[in-house]
Amino acid sequence: MPKSSKVLLGIVLLFLISGCGSNALLQKVTPVNTSLSKYKYAIISVEGKNELIKKEKGFGITQKELKNNFISNLSEQNKFKHVSGESSGNHEKETLFIKLVIEELSYLSGASSYFFGIFSGNASLKVLARLIDVKTNKTIGEIRSFSKTSLSGGIFRGGTATLIREISEKLVEDITNY
């Protein structure tokens, strides 16, 4: 094999297996202008923005993983006495409802990313976190996070599960600062 072919093959292989992490971006749609310290309970729900999103490949697993990951991350911060995916009683005046709305989804499993490399495409995920005071039913803030994988990440770039972790961490970090 000629030297130029070996170099080209080496570059292609490096491109296929190189690993670059994606970074979740944050946008404060409606800034939170109040302290969240008055809330003792947080209820988390995850839904699709519309019927088209709900029909996207991987929506069900993304919805479930996003909810579980977000609840776990938020619980670890000890900002709230109780964090759950459902109401745990009559605590209306002390409860914050966090509705995570999946606005965009391009699902990619980690296995597809690993086995098919750059040929499997990219994953992308956009989530709007709407913070609602349960007592007044008023939105007190909205934060959007977006992330996508990059072809330059090759087979180690991860898939939708990676994006879910990144977005959950970014949103929880921002929410717990209020």
Image: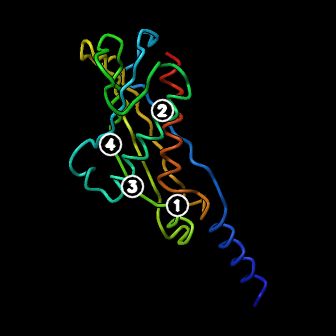
Residue at the farthest bottom position: 1
At 51% from the left edge and 19% from the top edge, which residue is drawn?
79
Sequence-wise, which precedes: disc 2 or disc 4? Answer: 2
Residue 25 position within the rendered picture, expressed as x and y whole percent measured from the top left: 50, 37
Q: For the residue labelled by badge 4, is the local secondary structure a helix, a strand or a loop?
A: strand
Sequence-wise, which precedes: disc 1 or disc 4? Answer: 4
At 67% from the left edge and 62% from the top edge, which residue is drawn?
18
- Asked whether, in this view, residue 95 is left or right of residue 116, the answer is left
Residue type marked 4? Glu
Residue identified by numbered label 3: 106
Residue identified by numbered label 1: 110
Residue 168 position within the rendered picture, expressed as x and y whole percent measured from the top left: 49, 37
Near mark 4 (Cα within 10 A), the count class, few <14, some 14-19 or many ≥20, is: some
Label drawn at residue 132: none
At 34% from the left edge and 27% from the top edge, which residue is drawn?
130
Dots 3 and 4: beta carbons under 8 Å? no
Q: For the residue labelled by badge 2, is the local secondary structure a helix, a strand or a loop?
A: strand
Residue type marked 1? Gly
Residue 15 position within the rendered picture, expressed as x and y whole percent measured from the top left: 64, 66
Label 3 and label 1: CA atoms lie apart by 13 Å
* 54 versus 28 height, above or below: below
Closer to the eye: label 2 or 1? 1
* 160 versus 70 height, above or below: below
Sequence-wise, which precedes: disc 2 or disc 1? Answer: 2
Residue identified by numbered label 4: 103
Residue identified by numbered label 2: 26
